[in-house]
Amino acid sequence: MSVSIDNGALESMQSLLGEQFEDTLVFCCSEFERLENDLKLALDSDKQEAIRHAHSLKSNAAQFGAISLSSTARAIEQGLIKGDDASVEENMQVITEQVVGSKSQLLQWLTMNS
């Protein structure tokens, strides 16, 4: 699975946040990692908490244009809601790749556009 970033979403957030954009994007990238870890921890013990973390990861990723990460987190969220363990397992296998790849591409974009 490849990592995809929506440059238009990043440009919109940069325009909206102005001087706060860089710090916010860096913070958001660290949030991707925290939410992924929290999701993994909650997965076997608290389904509602896992759904909440997947939802937050989906939303944060979408806001900053991390399209494939948002899509993966959405699939996990929906799988948990529907009780589709196979879908959850399949998407959990790629979530770390999506977090690492998205973070890398977002920070690279920041370097090239600031």
Image (cartoon, rainbow, N blue to C red):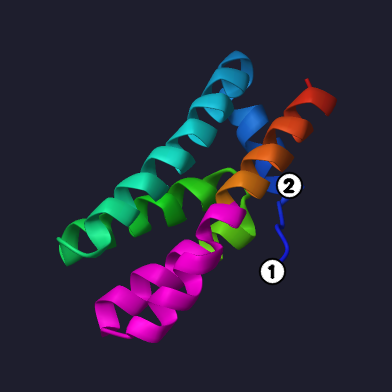
Which one is nearer the viewer's eye here, 17 or 74? 74
Which residue lies under the disc numbered 1?
Answer: 1
Which one is nearer the viewer's eye here, 44 or 18? 44
Residue lying furthest top: 19
Q: Residues within 10 Å of mark 2 (few under 14, many from 20)?
A: few
Q: Are marks 2 and 1 in contact (CB under 8 Å)?
A: no
Image height check: is 4 above or below 33? below
- Distance, label 2 to label 1, CA atoms, is 21 Å
Disc marking residue 8: 2
What segment carries the magenta color?
72-98
Relative image position of residue 105 (x, y in whole percent)? 73, 41
Badge 2 amino acid: Gly
The secondary element bearing badge 2 is classed as helix
Q: Quadrant of the C terminus?
A: top right
Predominant SS along the magenta part? helix
Q: Is residue 80 visible?
A: yes
The residue located at (70%, 31%) in the rendering is 107
